[in-house]
Image (tube, helix red, strand yellow):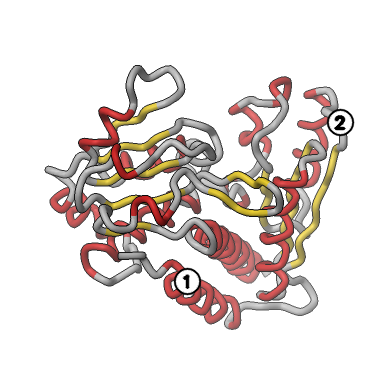
Amino acid sequence: MKLDCKYITSQVFERTQERLKSVYRKDQPPTVALFYVGDDPHIERFIRLKREAAQQLGIVFDVIRFHKAPLFQTFASKLRAVAQSRNVHAVIIQRPLPPELSSASLENFIPSVKEVEGQKYKSPYLPPIGKATLSLLKYTFTHDWHVKNSDGDFFKKTFKKQFIVIAGRGPTSGRPIASTLVRYKIPTVITHSQTPYPELFYKQADVLITTTGRPIVHEGCIKQGALLMNFGYRFEEGKTYGDYHECEIENKAGYYTAVSGGTGPLHIAFLMENIVSAYINQVKKKTRED
């Protein structure tokens, strides 16, 4: 059965709109700064989708772009300056970054209240892609997509005997999904490019979460009735492809996410939720100070 990601996405978006209405200030609307390095049309497509979602909510979305990789000091200095601005409420670092800029220390230049991707140690926000994963897991078992802080016991009990595999450990998908599941005490196994015979893990998985952007899953390497979530995307000849073809797995998987219009929009919806939370926190703080 195909999971209704569009329904959950619309619900998250509507809830975020309602939260924003109560604090929205026309004289200082929520403002996001996204840092992007490179000239990749596929990444730029995702940035455009983020910008369009932000605009629907009345969020100002600025892209600070470097066509070529600058010196680390130059990038970090610009990041720090923008992140410290009172007119910027959220900062996003578009990944993947060039190797010379790939450092976990970059998040330290962003105040915790503005680091909406949940990458920072002890961030007040869950990674949006992790929230999307939790939401789909809960929806599959309860038809309730709303994940609460008190759901730790639910996830621990529900998935105690479930074998969950994450295919891929990259910084944009696999790693933040894994860190989110660990936070909710959901045990996982991670496979990657160096894992011998990863298909053996796929065949045993009750829940298989793919993040590679390559065609790694087919009917013969999944468990009957398994839950499949695709977070890996690639573009070929103007079309979007995931880590599996729906027609190959739809009759064997118990539940699965669509490749097109599936987890991508849901991920963005939860990113918008984090941005609005950051804005609300800063507006309330400023109100108290005034």
Instruction: Please state which amino acid type lies under the numbered disc 2.
Output: Lys
User: Where in the figure is residue 16, as x and y percent of width and height?
Assistant: 53, 73
Disc nearest the viewer among 2 and 1:
1
Q: Which mark is residue 6?
A: 1
Dot 1, how many residues are within 10 Å of its Cα: few (below 14), some (14-19), or many (20+)?
A: some
User: Which quadrant holds the C terminus?
Assistant: bottom right
Question: Residue 144 versus residue 289: which sits nearer the camera?
Answer: 144
Q: Is residue 88 visible?
A: yes
Q: Residue at x 39, y 70 (%)?
A: 4
Instruction: Please state which amino acid type lies under the numbered disc 1.
Output: Lys
Question: Residue 120 versus residue 190: which sits nearer the camera?
Answer: 190
Q: Is residue 119 left or right of residue 207?
A: right
Q: Residue at x 73, y 20 (%)?
A: 100
Residue of label 2: 68
User: Where in the figure is residue 285, as x and y percent of width and height?
Assistant: 60, 63
How many numbered marks have been drawn onto this rendered protein structure?
Answer: 2
Question: Residue 46 versus residue 101: which sits nearer the camera?
Answer: 46
The quadrant where residue 96 appears = top right
Q: Residue at x 46, y 31 (%)?
A: 169
Disc 1 element: helix
Disc 2 element: loop
Q: Is residue 124 visible?
A: no
Q: Is residue 162 left or right of residue 181?
A: left
Q: Residue at x 62, y 36 (%)?
A: 107
The quadrant where residue 256 appears = bottom left
The quadrant where residue 98 appears = top right
User: Where in the figure is residue 211, as x and y percent of width and height?
Assistant: 47, 40
Earlier residue among tags 2 and 1:
1
Q: Is residue 221 left or right of residue 64?
A: left
**Quick check: 157 above or below 53?**
above
**Quick check: 138 above or below 231?**
below
Q: Find the distance from the CA under tag 2 to the CA under tag 1.
A: 36 Å
